[in-house]
Amino acid sequence: MSTLAAEPAPDADAAAAVDTTAGAVADRARTVQNHPVNARRVLASEWVKLRSLRSTAWTLLSAVVLMIGIGWLAGWGSNDSWSDLSPQEQATFSPLDVTLAGFYLAQLAVSVLGVLLVTGEYATGMVRATFAAVPRRLPVLWAKTVLFAAVTFGSMLVAATVSFAGGQRLLDEHSIGFGGDGVLRGIVGVTGYLTAVAVLAVALGFVIRSTAGGVATMCGLLLVAPTLGLLLPRSWQENLLPYLPSNAGAAVFNAAPSADSLSATGGALALGVWLLVALAAAAFTLTRRDV
C-alpha cells in the first residue's frame, strides 16, 4: 500500500515566504548600515559621473586650448604690431594682460560644462536615482561644486601658466618673466576667476535646471551685462559695472585695470558675494522643489 507524502500547509508556505522576505530586508538593512551615505562616497559617485561624461574632457580641452591659443596669438600679434602703437599705448602696454587674454573665451567653455554637469542629470532623469541614494540632496550640491572647482582650478592653472610662458616668448623684447611685477597674482588670479565661474555655473544649473537657460544666463551675466551697462548713465556705470562678476574678476588679475575698477581685494570680495548668493539660492531651491 503506497503512502502519499504530506503536502505543506498553505500557512507554512506563507510563513516561510515572510521569513525569506524579512531576511532579505534585514540583509539589505545591514548592508546600508555598513555602507552609510557620507561625504567621501558622495564625492566618489560624483567623480564617476564627471569623468564618465565625454563632454567633460572635450569641453575642458577646449577651455585649455582657447586659453593658450588666444594668449599666444595675442602675444604674437602685439609684438608684430608694436611699431604701430602710439607712445601712450606703448607706455601702458601690459605683457601680462595680453598673454592672459584667452580667459575671455575660456570662461564660456567652463560655464557650459558647469551648467551641463547639473542639467544633464535632470534631462536624462538620472537625478531621481541620485537623490534616492542621497535623500538629503545638499551633499550632492557640495560634491559637484567641490569636484568641478578642483578640476577647473587645476586645468586652468596649467593653461594660464603655459599661455603666459609661450606668449612672453612671442612678445620677444617686450616680454616679462615669471618674476615680473604682478605676474604670480595675475596667473593665480585668472585661475581663481575661472574657478569662480565654474562654481557659479554649477549653482545656476541647480537653480534653473535647463541647459539652454543656464548657458544663456551665464553668457548674459559674463558678456552681455557688461556691454549693455555701458549704455547706462555714467553715475550708474561707476556704481554697478565694477561689481559684475567679469569686471570684479578682471580687477583681481589684471596688471593694468581701468580707473573705475575695484581693487584686487574688492574684486575678490565681490566675486565671493556672487558665489555665496548663487550657492544659497541653489541650496534653497534644491531642498524646496520636487525633482
Image (tube, rainbow, N blue to C red):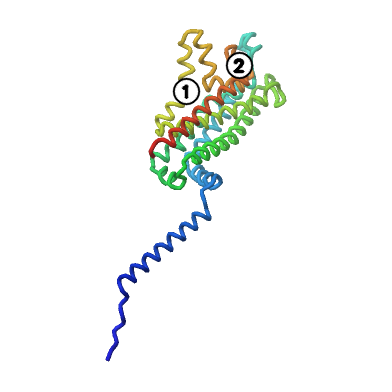
Name the residue at the right extreme. Answer: 179
Task: Find residue 242 and name its label.
Answer: none
Task: Find residue 257 and name its label.
Answer: 2
* Left or right of 24, for residue 179: right
Tell me the amino acid under the disc marked 1: Leu
Q: Quadrant of the C terminus?
A: top left
x, y percent for residue 285: 43, 33
Residue 39 falls in image quadrant: top right
Name the residue at the left extreme. Answer: 1
Tell me the amino acid under the disc marked 2: Pro
Whether 178 is drawn above or below 259: the answer is: below
How many circles with numbers are drawn on the protein?
A: 2
Mark 2 is surrounded, within 10 Å at the Cα level, by few (under 14), some (14 to 19) or many (20 or more) other residues, namely some
Residue placed at 27% from the left, 91% from the top? 1
Mark 2 to mark 1 CA distance (whole Å)? 20 Å
Mark 1 is surrounded, within 10 Å at the Cα level, by few (under 14), some (14 to 19) or many (20 or more) other residues, namely some
Report if residue 15 is visible in the image: yes
Whether 188 is drawn above or below 10: the answer is: above
As helix, strand or loop, the secondary structure at mark 1 comes to helix
For disc 1, the marked residue is: 221
Report if residue 106 is visible in the image: no
Residue placed at 57% from the left, 24% from the top? 73
Residue placed at 41% from the left, 62% from the top? 22
The one of 203 and 70 positioned closer to us in this rendering: 203
x, y percent for residue 2: 28, 89
x, y percent for residue 287: 44, 37
Whether 241 is drawn above or below 168: the answer is: above
Residue 170 falls in image quadrant: top right
